[in-house]
């Protein structure tokens, strides 16, 4: 799984749970920060993509402030 903080590709929302997702090796996937905090029936995969037209710094703000529940 990729990190939302370092992912350089497009970020979508998961239609199943509304959390950020990306196009991964196996189709839409959730980010590593979500491993213990997302209650999605498809996790670690994600549902259909909801395409977002991110405005200005909103995506960067999301990347910086998204909670990280992955154990380090």
Image (tube, grey):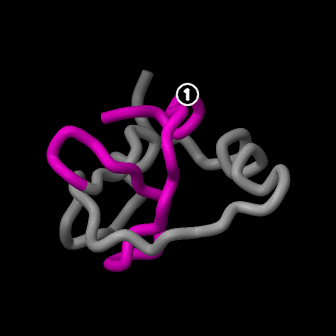
Residue placed furthest toward the top: 72
Q: Position of residue 72 (x, y in %)?
A: 44, 21
**Residue lying furthest right:** 56
The residue segment tinted magenta is: 1-27
Between 52 and 61, which is closer to the camera in this rendering? 52
Q: Main secondary structure of the magenta part?
A: loop
User: With 22 as the anchor, is 47 left or right in this view?
Assistant: left
Q: How many marks?
A: 1
Q: Residue at x 48, y 61 (%)?
A: 12
Image quarter of the N terminus = top left
Residue 43, position as x, y percentages in the image: 23, 59
Who's the residue at 78% across and 56% down the image? Answer: 58
Residue 47, image x and y in percent? 27, 70
Residue 9 against residue 19 in the figure, above or below? above
| Residue that numbered label 1 is attached to | 6
Vertical side of 52 occupied by 28: above or below: above
Asked if the magenta segment contains residue 10, the reply would be yes
Q: Which x, y percent locates residue 45?
A: 22, 56
Residue visible at 28% across and 56% down in the picture: 28
Quarter of the image for residue 68 reads: top right
Q: Residue furthest left?
A: 26
Tell me the residue at 70%/61% (across/down). 54
Q: Is residue 9 magenta?
A: yes
- The secondary element bearing badge 1 is classed as loop
Is 55 on the left-hand or right-hand side of 12? right
Dot 1: within a 10 Å radius of its alpha carbon, few (fewer than 14), some, or many (20 or more) residues?
few
């Amino acid at each position: 799984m990729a990190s939302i903080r370092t992912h350089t590709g497009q970020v979508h929302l998961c239609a199943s749970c509304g959390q950020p997702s990306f196009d991964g090796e196996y189709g839409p996937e959730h980010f590593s920060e979500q491993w213990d905090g997302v209650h999605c029936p498809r996790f670690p995969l994600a549902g259909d993509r909801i395409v977002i037209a991110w405005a200005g710094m909103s995506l960067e703000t999301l990347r910086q402030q998204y909670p990280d529940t992955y154990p380090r």
